[in-house]
Image: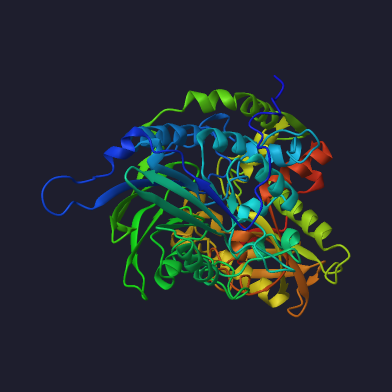
Amino acid sequence: MPLNRRKFLKKSAVTGAGVALAGAAAAPSAEAAVATGHGHGKPKPKRYSLTVMGTTDLHGHVFNWDYFKDAEYTDAAGNAQGLARISTLVNAVRKEKGRGNTLLLDAGDTIQGTPLTYYYAKVDPITAKGGPVHPMAQAMNAIGYDAVALGNHEFNYGIETLRKFEQQCRFPLLGANALDAKTLKPAFPPYFMKKFHVKGAPPVKVAVLGLTNPGIAIWDKAYVQGKLVFPGLEEQAAKWVPKLRSMGADVVVVSAHSGSSGTSSYGDQLPYVENSAALVAQQVPGIDAILVGHAHVEIPELKVTNTKSGKTVVLSEPLAYAERLSLFDFELVFEKGRWSVESVAASVRNSNAVVDDPRITKLLKDEHDVVVAYVNQVVGTATETLTTVEARYKDAPIIDLITKVQEDVVKAALAGTEYASLPVLSQASPFSRTSEIPAGDVTIRDLSSLYVYDNTLVAKLLTGAQVRAYLEFSAEYFVRTAAGAAVDVEKLTNAGNRPDYNYDYVSGLSYDIDIAQAAGSRIKNLSFNGAALDDAQQFVFAVNNYRANGGGAFPHVASAKELWAESTEIRTRIAEWVTAKGSLDPKEFASVDWKLTREGTPVF
């Protein structure tokens, strides 16, 4: 079925420093939300109830569908996903509170994360002349979002794709700390303002300030360097919140693509904090509530005291992938000629409690069907079955496929740079014990399921000595087994409860792991190009971003110099590699780089 490319196109792009809208006259139930107070003595002050709804980290989830499994999404916790469910929840809240008394926001990471979003960025791109309207724009326009903060993953496909998505949205994409690198003026609207009309009283003015993640400068350096800069959230909130108050805002809500933990995954590469939502609440007076994003954790309600005003700021982070909807319920009172916030309470609603909104299902059925067909298409032929069944304790070709793809991508990325002549080593882990690429036809789905995480690729600079230490740390994964003892493969790994994903292969070298030795002295016969490894030699290390940021606490890698990084998922790179080759033949990527030994004798 052909796609309707004209669905829900917005007439013009959002421009200017901010966006101000006057809300429609309040729904009849708005009057119920306002107590006018008649009778004897002093009249009761007027009151108004407002509900701000929020989602975050939608990552392209429109339906409750797992494109990698080609089936309905399920997990052990019974969660459901997708904007079609969120739409049902939003409809219920609007009916309950009166549509004129609600606002719907999102805290970013919208256009990346599923084959659906990949397809409309790369395969049938929205940037093409007469191209399609992005499924996320269609869904969010139909649901009626008021404003959305920029997430870091908005930049993954480049600024052109982001700007086209922005044009297609009927709501502003906010980013007060996404500045033009030359003028240092906001490159996106910093804020959104809306008036809520109240019978017999002045309107309630609500301002929404959008803040994004400073880590974009690192994670999407290739796209943003020299074009955009991303100062810290606290600094920009301190600049904008007083402005919004001076413009008459009665309520200030921040939509922040930044977690609440106060930590950073990028070390000291930037002077800003990655997860600074709680710091903003604590340091910047004049904020009533913060919709939190980025961290993919569920926080129904977090209360933070502002150190300057002593007032409580309420934070809420709904679970990612449209699994939850946050609600901020505001009670306002009109006294001494102005509205003030009397109380804020936050909570979350679970999308597993409702069914898909048929309006959204119908709207995007065509796009969904196209992508299902895409992920099930054959992209190559495997000469033999590849499996991870023994990959924990034997050098398995299926893991070598990952390391080979990473090596090729990094070599191409560093071509023409001062690091082009350095040898590239590559790391990968046996994530799954059940992954299989069958002999014969290989689909995009088969390849995507091999790499189960959304990891991206980073190139770091390591010395031979650092690589040796890295391998020793990795080898702690094996249970010490004496030379004469029986070997039970079920009891051979996960020493100290270390998970499989924290055991790394490193390709490009040759080494033995002597499991009869104590941890820390197991790496034997470590060589490069047939000669003993030189501790002073420099290597480019192709590594996933989880490990590069310190995940698993492997030595040296997090503090090592970063040479290059990208935001395309490694699983996408694997699919691209196989598509280009047409065939999956272990002769092209498999190599026995390591083996388990005991006192020099191979275990297998």
Task: Looking at the picture, tell me which residue is in the foreground, 330 or 353.
Answer: 330
Residue 119 locus on image (x, y percent): 70, 37
Residue 245, quarter of the rendered image: bottom left
In the image: residue 207, left or right of residue 430: left
Quadrant of image for the N terminus = top right
Q: Is residue 95 visible?
A: yes
In the image: residue 234, left or right of residue 533: left
Q: Is residue 514 above or below residue 569?
A: below
Task: Looking at the picture, tell me which residue is in the foreground, 515 or 374.
Answer: 374
Of all residues, the one furthest to the right in this rendering is 416
Q: How is the image coloured?
A: rainbow
Task: Looking at the picture, tell me which residue is in the foreground, 522 or 223.
Answer: 223
Of all residues, the one furthest to the top in this rendering is 1
Residue 137 locus on image (x, y percent): 61, 38
Residue 34, quarter of the rendered image: top left
Give me the residue at 52% from left, 66% from top.
Answer: 240
Of all residues, the one furthest to the bottom in this rendering is 536
Residue 403 locus on image (x, y percent): 72, 54
Q: Is residue 66 visible?
A: no
